[in-house]
Amino acid sequence: MSSTKQASAGRRGKSVRSDCFIELTLRDSGGLNIDLTSKVKSLYGDSIDHLIRSGLAHFKIDNADLLIEDAGALPIVLMARLEAAVRRLDPDAEVDPWLPEPFEEMVGSKRQRQRRSRLYLPGNEPKFMISAAIHQPDGLILDLEDSVAVSEKDAARILIRNALIHLDFMGAEKMVRVNQGERGLKDLEFVIPYGAQLILLPKMETGAEVKLFADRIAEIRNTSGIEHEVWLMPIVESAKGSWNAFEIAASDPSIVGLAIGLEDYTADIGVQRTNEGKESIWARSQLVNGARAAGVSPIDTVFSDVGDMDALLDSVIEAKSLGFEGKGCIHPRQIPIVHQGFAPTADEVKKAKRIVLAFEDAEKQGLGVVSLGSKMIDPPVVKRALRTVDEAIRASILAEDWRDQV
């Protein structure tokens, strides 16, 4: 190791849960001395001791004092905090990752899938990650950007890596929001080889910025032998980014969606953000059109008032009317409201079914036009109806074999 003899990682204090604090002090001799304080020491003290000794052996540490204050941390959290402390002893040293057992085989996600809701989870708070999937969002975002203090971003990378490997996401898309610039490019090394399926790129203003990340992901995939695609969702959060919405959305084939972030956008143009959203209508419309022109999904911003479900539903319905397909969530209770707001209504589904059946009947007859009664149906209307039917099926509003039930 280096001349640095002591380092720590993790969180301590009475309010901490599902986490731990680890302080590692290297010595020249004397073996290992582990001082463990834990709420579950009587039940799991021996297991924690064995796990930590295995980790120290992995890192080839034979002589050290280790202080552990455990607040119910899972093994993957203990592992992440120990590795973070080891890495902090010498940030420039090569450290062999200490990886948990994978929950499942690492696979990619589909390009075309529901992304109505995505739940943001602070990347350095394990208590929020452990059971987040039970709320059934379409995607879970392990966040390395705004929710993580600069001093803790290195530790959050390791925690997120272990979560990607070991936690059950219950079908939710495994998303990670990385940082900007060089720090964000470094983040990719900790998430791409370990199961991240979609990367959110914050504060993008040009297509060239997106390409830097896309090219780095391609390099890491090639080096790590990752065969499945890793999708991108740039986030536009400024006047310049809004102006360049189409350029950003069309900058790489791996992009599946374009999102907007209104907290930074409204600050950038010098106005206050409101629930009604009049101050951002141009940017949101610009983003929808840019995304649609590039053939990707437009995704709306988060709704910051977690206590007002009526206003949230109004916001989702408005977003849908503008052409958005999804919305960010900052609290689990927002997820069902977002799903409700984006789901096709009964009348929309009924009308779409009639149009789709008329379209399919016209195709069987070799007709060049589609009619519903005495009314001619234009191709864009058929396209919208097909999308509505697909959305209804994905939302379990309509059975996949609905034609057999007509």
Image (cartoon, rainbow, N blue to C red):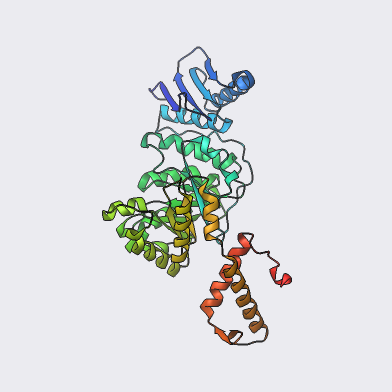
Foreground residue among 150 and 96 = 150
Label tally: 0
Q: Residue placed at 49% from the left, 29% from the top?
A: 81
Q: Which of the two residues, 156 or 14, is positioned nearer the viewer here? A: 14
Note whether 129 is above or below 370 in the view shown.
Answer: above
Does residue 219 show up?
A: no
Residue 285, image x and y in percent?
Answer: 38, 65
* Picture quarter with the N terminus: top left
Name which residue lies at 33% across and 51% down: 264
Vertical placement of residue 195 versus 205, above or below: above
Q: Residue furthest left?
A: 270
* Residue 45 percent coordinates (x, y): 60, 20
**Residue 355, image quadrant:** bottom right
Q: Residue furthest right?
A: 404
Kindly identify the residue that appears in the image at 47 percent across and 27 percent down.
15
- Residue 305 can be seen in this image: yes
Percent of width and height locating residue 313: 48, 56
- In the depicted view, which residue is nearer to us: 284 or 224? 284
Position of 363 with respect to 241 (left or right) is right
What residue appears at the point 59 percent right and 73 percent down from the top-left corner?
Answer: 352
Between 98 and 146, which is closer to the camera in this rendering?
A: 146
- Seen in the picture, residue 301 relative to 70 is either above or below; the reply is below
Quadrant of the snapshot with the C terminus: bottom right
Residue that protrudes farthest toward the front in the picture: 310
Q: Position of residue 269 (x, y in %)?
A: 27, 56
